Amino acid sequence: MNAYYTAGVNNTGSHMFDLLGFFFGDAVWIEGFFSKNVSRKEGDPNVDGLIMFKSGVYATFQTCDVKDYLIFELNCFLQKGRIVLKDSGFNVDYYNICESKFYSGYKELYKDRHGFKTKYKRNFMTNAVEHLVRCINNKKESTSSGDDGLKALALIEACIVSARNDGKRIYLLDKKEKR
């Protein structure tokens, strides 16, 4: 799993960490390194690093320079295929595993021509408010809870502490929770 973002670990990185937690569960540890790529927000550094999740998934995250371009992408290599969230999550590519056309006995990833279609409007705040109203009206829990937000913030803080300490591994779960 590889993630790419711009515009600061507290700004865009918070959404990346939240999404990684949504997909892969609780993080066991994180290692962070300050990036030379700027975030344009004083006090909100860009940080590159590695996370290990309780599920056994490892994820790298890397920043790009926001003065060059905006990016928010996740590239997930899975046992049964590959998923790429691109264009800030508005487009998704899915790759199936198929027998290789070129190498006998091997399998390769081939892009699914149908892809994923979304009904979401390109207005994040409107979508978020509409979702919360539906949850209240239907007495259901939100897709993203306050606890999820706290976990993302804990990852950000641990990431920055790690970067301040030359990439020292910071554990987020105690020994009993790591199992």
Image (cartoon, grey):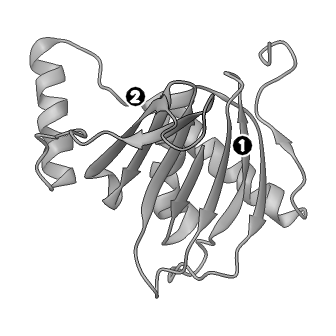
Q: Position of residue 142 (x, y in %)?
A: 29, 25
Q: Where is residue 92 in the image (x, y as percent from the top left)?
A: 31, 46
- Amino acid type, label 1: Ile
Q: Name the residue under label 2.
A: 145
Provide the secondary structure element on which disc 2 rests.
loop
| C-alpha separation, residue under disc 1 versus residue under disc 2 | 21 Å
Asked if residue 169 can be seen in this view, the reply is yes
Q: Which of 40 and 70 is in front in this view?
A: 70
Q: In which quarter of the image is residue 28?
A: top right
Q: Which of marks 1 and 2 is nearer the N terminus?
A: 1
Apparent side of residue 39 relative to residue 55 in the rendered image (left or right): left
Residue closest to the eye, 138 or 121: 121
Q: Which amino acid does label 2 sit on?
A: Ser
Query: Depth check: 76 or 178 in front?
Result: 76
What is the crowding at mark 1: few (fewer than 14 residues within 10 Å), some, or many (at least 20)?
A: many
**Residue 38 x, y percent position in the rendering:** 58, 83
Rendered-image quadrant of the N terminus: top right
- The quadrant holding residue 171 is top right
Look at mark 1 in the image and give the residue it sits on.
51
Residue 51, quarter of picture: top right
